[in-house]
Image (cartoon, rainbow, N blue to C red):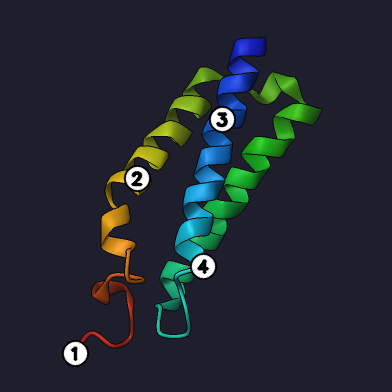
């Protein structure tokens, strides 16, 4: 269980961090739906990090794998966020 808990903390910590990095690049021009989606994903990342410390029975490999899959998507798409949200995610799509 210790290895699973460590994997969980690393996966959900990384998830929260990647979402945080996206959120700090969002501003008033970012579509509200995009901001909301990242806020929800960040909240889930934070809950996934904290909850198993109180309720270890919540930890499972499927949850860790899912968090890592999302982190992978966040990582490979990070280059599109270097200058802020991609144009498609903003009100100024002209």
Residue designated by label 3: 10
The numbered mark, 1 or 3, whose residue comes first in the sequence reads 3
Q: Give me the C-alpha separation between circle 2 and circle 4.
A: 16 Å
Q: Please tell me which residue is depicted at 55% across the width and 57% down the height of the picture.
A: 40
Side of 82 where 6 appears, left or right: right
Side of 2 where 74 appears, left or right: left
Q: Please tell me which residue is depicted at 45% across the width and 73% down the height of the picture.
A: 26
Q: Disc number at residue 24?
A: 4
Side of 70 where 11 appears, left or right: right
Q: Mark 2 touching mark 3, by CB under 8 A?
A: no
Query: 34 and 86: which one is in front?
Result: 86
Task: Please tell me whether mark 2 sits on a helix, a strand or a loop.
Answer: helix
Q: Position of residue 15 (x, y in %)?
A: 50, 43
Q: Give me the C-alpha separation between circle 1 and circle 4.
A: 23 Å
Q: Give me the C-alpha separation between circle 2 and circle 3.
A: 15 Å
Q: Mark 1 touching mark 3, by CB under 8 A?
A: no
Q: Position of residue 12 (x, y in %)?
A: 56, 37
Q: Assign the N terminus to one quadrant of the image.
A: top right
Residue designated by label 1: 94
Q: Mark 1 touching mark 4, by CB under 8 A?
A: no
Residue designated by label 2: 75
The numbered mark, 1 or 4, whose residue comes first in the sequence reads 4
Q: Position of residue 38 (x, y in %)?
A: 49, 60
Q: Give me the C-alpha separation between circle 3 and circle 4.
A: 21 Å
Which image quarter: residue 75? top left
Report crowding for label 2: few under 14, some 14 to 19, many 20 or more residues within 10 A (C-alpha).
few
């Amino acid at each position: 269980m210790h290895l699973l808990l460590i994997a969980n903390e690393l996966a959900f910590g990384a998830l929260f961090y990647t979402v945080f990095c996206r959120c700090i690049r969002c501003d008033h021009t970012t579509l509200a739906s995009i901001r909301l989606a990242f806020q929800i994903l960040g909240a889930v990342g934070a809950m996934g990090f904290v909850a198993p410390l109180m309720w270890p029975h919540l930890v499972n490999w499927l949850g860790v794998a899912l968090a890592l899959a999302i982190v992978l998507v966040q990582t490979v798409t990070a280059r599109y966020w270097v200058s802020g949200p991609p144009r498609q995610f903003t009100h100024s799509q002209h």
